[in-house]
């Protein structure tokens, strides 16, 4: 199991200590570094800035949101990043959710699976420097004459690729989306996955691999895993309760929160309902308090070093190929010592 450093997306401004953490990751044997975007900082700009200070780390987006860019624009960015990094870029994409897609990007959130399939098809053509042609329900390249000036024509990238197949990973949580990921992508970016109960995801992936006709030997599963080292397990869990409460309770409307559904599948349906009810009513402290230590321990590594080392065996035997951890330079070095 490889290690990746997750930088997430920014809050009010550029976080402190990021440069030092990236340097520590490269020096400590980490394999990759990952950035994200929601509706503030984007994923690509920080990754390019920080990636310029590395020579070995894979530079990944987890994730670039589909609605933020036309497929061709994402392909251009991916190819450019691959050139700048000497073939070290990995493109993580995701459909996001209706609140962000419609509320921030002003785009309709309809048929996300069909849109993802078409998006990836266009990415593959563009990044292989083929003449891009696509007639779909959601994307038309070139634009049909009746919808524009009639002057559009099929084009190929002027930029020659470093690699004709840049790895594409898809962020997915729902059953059909996970199956689609196994069918068309080079890797999967899950969230709130647990090595103690992953039969649901194994079935979804097997369905997608069957549709693909093979299970690629190098299929990547890159998972963000929160790690908090502390001699007091409860105190360590307290660090993560607000994060889980936010995603389960507030990252999506009632009935349309994919993160809540992912945690509920682990056997916490009742707890998730309680957390969501509190959070949507504005009772964030109560929502945080409703996150049990057992919930935290299923999806994260918390507690004394010896406990974390013992629990690592379950993660190493799981589907996860890259564990993406968050933390400062000191945390990065400490985790490297325990895992690597």
Image (spheres, rainbow, N blue to C red):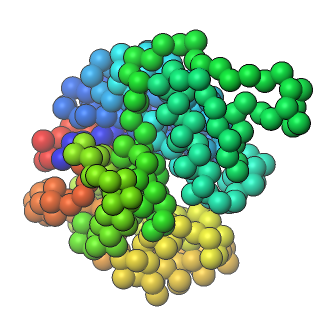
In the image, is residue 44 above or below residue 338? above
Query: Where does the image place residue 148, in percent across and percent down from the top left?
Result: 87, 31
Q: Nearer the viewer, residue 255 or 338?
A: 255
User: Does the image show residue 284?
Assistant: no
Q: Nearer the viewer, residue 205 or 85?
A: 205
- Residue occupying the point 27% across, 47% down: 216
- Residue occupying the point 49% across, 73% down: 261
- Residue occupying the point 68% across, 54% down: 100
In the image, is residue 269 above or below residue 97? below
User: Does the image show residue 185?
Assistant: yes
- Residue occupying the point 30% across, 18% down: 55
Query: Where does the image place residue 188, in percent across and percent down from the top left?
Result: 38, 51
Question: Which of the 4 image quadrants contains residue 232?
Answer: bottom left
In the image, is residue 97 above or below residue 19? below
Query: Where does the image place residue 177, in percent across and percent down from the top left?
Result: 49, 61
Left or right: residue 29 versus residue 198 is left
In the image, is residue 298 above or below residue 17? below
């Amino acid at each position: 199991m490889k290690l990746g450093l997750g930088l997430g997306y920014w809050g009010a401004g550029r976080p402190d200590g990021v440069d030092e953490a990236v340097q520590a990751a490269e020096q400590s044997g980490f394999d990759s570094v990952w950035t994200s975007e929601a509706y503030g900082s984007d994923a690509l700009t920080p990754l390019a800035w920080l990636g310029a200070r590395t020579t070995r780390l894979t530079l990944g987006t987890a994730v670039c949101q589909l609605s933020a860019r036309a497929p061709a624009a994402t392909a251009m960015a991916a190819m450019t990043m691959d050139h700048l990094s000497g073939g070290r870029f990995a493109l993580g994409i995701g459909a996001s959710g209706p609140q962000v897609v419609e509320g921030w990007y002003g785009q309709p959130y309809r048929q996300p699976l069909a849109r993802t399939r078409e998006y990836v098809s266009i990415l593959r053509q563009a990044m292989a420097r083929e003449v891009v042609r696509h007639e779909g329900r959601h994307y038309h390249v070139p634009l049909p004459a009746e919808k524009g000036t009639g002057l559009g024509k099929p084009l190929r990238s002027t930029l020659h690729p470093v690699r004709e197949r840049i790895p594409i990973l898809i962020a997915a949580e729902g059953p059909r989306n996970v199956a689609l990921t196994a069918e068309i992508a080079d890797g999967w970016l899950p969230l709130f996955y647990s090595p103690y109960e992953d039969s649901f995801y194994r079935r979804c992936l097997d369905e997608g691999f069957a549709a693909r006709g093979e299970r690629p030997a190098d299929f990547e599963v890159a998972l963000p895993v929160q790690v908090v080292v502390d001699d007091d397990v409860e105190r360590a869990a307290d660090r993560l309760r607000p994060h889980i409460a936010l995603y389960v309770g507030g990252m999506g409307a009632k009935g349309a929160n994919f993160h809540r559904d992912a945690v509920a599948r682990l056997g916490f349906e009742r707890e998730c309902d309680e957390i969501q009810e509190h959070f949507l009513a504005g009772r964030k402290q109560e929502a945080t308090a409703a996150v049990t230590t057992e919930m935290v321990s299923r999806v994260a590594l918390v507690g004394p070093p010896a406990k974390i080392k013992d629990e690592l065996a379950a993660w190493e035997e799981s589907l996860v190929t890259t564990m993406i951890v968050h933390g400062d330079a000191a945390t990065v070095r400490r985790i490297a010592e325990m895992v690597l």
